[in-house]
């Protein structure tokens, strides 16, 4: 089969479009013929190298996969070759208390498809059969692939961790990203007022189209000043943070009394400081969030099928142009998701 993989960590030039042995389904596993695979920032970090994470080399990235079941391994039931599927990107042991309780993203062995295993930048990918979800009706393979990781992450952050409520003010950083564009939609579904940031007029206009009530060009305006202006010096109830060092101080300063800050990433760096006096005096809560359990993704897909949420696809490129797709993400040339069309 054809796949895009890297043999050593480094720049875009390390991505090689080449022939690779097709995977074979073992007990409890399936092989999926990949139709589409979305790009994530995680893919770029894998290529460059993640401190403390030993990625098997050569490596095939890709966490968000839609496709057709090609073959099934021994013991697999209720899944038929030829059926369309969308893959849940979380991999867990399925045997520990966290997994049994439906909190598989808290499993000590939890990882993401395409991180420590080969992923979807290929014509075929092997996964546990339990990761195969019913294909969402009414969507293309491209649209389906744009959903799992970012919508699951945003849902877990806003709904599970922060318990978002109608009428609350929510600040969403980086609305042009995949997770940011998902968060705008989820916050609006819960009837919150959304303040969204982005770095260009075009992206801000698209954020408004998704439902943002107020937008901030973070390349030209102070986020905290604009938040305080919009909220009449009250601050926001929830800050949706995934940028890191570059926005942390503004995010923290934008919170109202009893506000909540939730973070899932640190794209611009992980160093941050907190004024502890502000933390206790304003009774602020800070939540960490990582992916989400499979039942939450099923809830997201139910809302997608009813038209409340929708995938946002910025561009579709062929598999062999994975390097160009990653470059577009690095250069922030997208709003929503960039997807590889594989077959």
Image (spheres, helix red, strand yellow):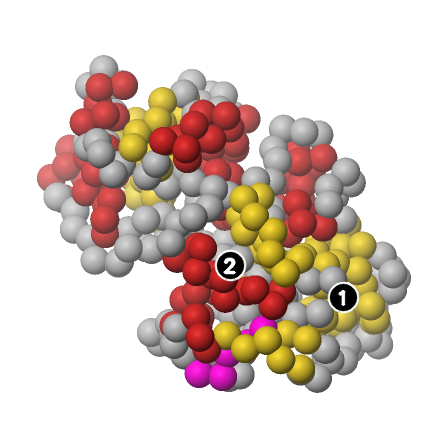
Give the extent of the magenta segment: 4-8
Taking the view exactly as shown, the residue that stands out farthest to the top is 232
Q: Point out residue 301 in the picture as x, y percentages from the top left corner.
A: 67, 41
* Residue highlighted by disc 1: 33
* Residue highlighted by disc 2: 325
Q: Point out residue 161 in the picture as x, y percentages from the top left corner.
A: 44, 42
For residue 290, which quarter of the picture? bottom left
Task: Tell me the CA gap for discs 1 and 2.
Answer: 21 Å
Q: Nearer the viewer, residue 101 or 108?
A: 108
- Residue shown at the point (20%, 53%) measured from the top left: 272
Q: Point out residue 168 in the picture as x, y percentages from the top left corner.
A: 39, 22
Q: Earlier in the sequence, mark 1 or mark 2?
A: 1
SS label for mark 1: strand
The quadrant of the picture occupied by the N terminus is bottom right
Q: Is 115 on the left or on the right of 242, as rendered? A: right
Majority secondary structure in the magenta region: strand
Q: Point out residue 308 in the picture as x, y percentages from the top left corner.
A: 63, 28
């Amino acid at each position: 089969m054809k796949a895009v993989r890297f043999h050593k960590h480094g720049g875009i030039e390390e991505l090689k479009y080449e022939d690779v042995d097709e995977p074979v389904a073992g007990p409890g596993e399936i092989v999926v013929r990949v139709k589409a695979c979305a790009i994530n920032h995680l893919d770029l970090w894998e290529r460059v190298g993640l401190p403390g994470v030993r990625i098997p080399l050569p490596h095939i990235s890709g966490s968000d996969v839609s496709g057709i079941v090609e073959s099934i391994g021994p013991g697999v039931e209720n899944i038929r070759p030829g059926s369309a599927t969308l893959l849940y990107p979380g991999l867990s042991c399925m045997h520990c208390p966290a997994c049994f309780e439906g909190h598989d993203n808290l499993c000590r062995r939890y990882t993401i498809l395409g991180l420590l295993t080969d992923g979807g930048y290929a014509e075929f990918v092997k996964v546990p059969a339990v990761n195969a979800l019913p294909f969402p009706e009414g969507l293309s393979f491209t649209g389906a692939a744009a959903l799992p990781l970012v919508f699951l992450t945003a849902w877990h952050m806003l709904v599970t961790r922060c318990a978002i409520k109608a009428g609350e003010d929510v600040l969403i950083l980086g609305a042009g990203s995949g997770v940011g564009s998902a968060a705008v939609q989820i916050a609006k579904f819960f009837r919150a007022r959304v303040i969204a940031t982005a770095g260009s007029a075009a992206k801000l206009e698209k954020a408004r189209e998704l439902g943002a009530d107020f937008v901030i060009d973070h390349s030209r305006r102070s986020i905290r000043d604009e938040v305080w202006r919009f909220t009449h010096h009250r601050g926001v109830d929830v800050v949706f943070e995934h940028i890191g060092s570059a926005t942390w101080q503004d995010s923290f300063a934008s919170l109202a009394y009893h506000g909540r800050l939730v973070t899932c990433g640190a794209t611009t760096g992980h160093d941050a400081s907190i004024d502890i006096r502000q933390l206790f005096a304003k009774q602020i809560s800070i939540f960490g969030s990582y992916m989400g359990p499979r039942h939450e993704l099923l809830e997201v897909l139910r809302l997608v099928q009813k038209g409340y949420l929708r995938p946002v696809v910025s561009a579709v490129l062929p598999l062999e142009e994975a390097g160009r797709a990653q470059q577009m993400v690095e250069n922030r040339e997208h709003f929503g998701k960039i997807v590889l069309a594989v077959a």
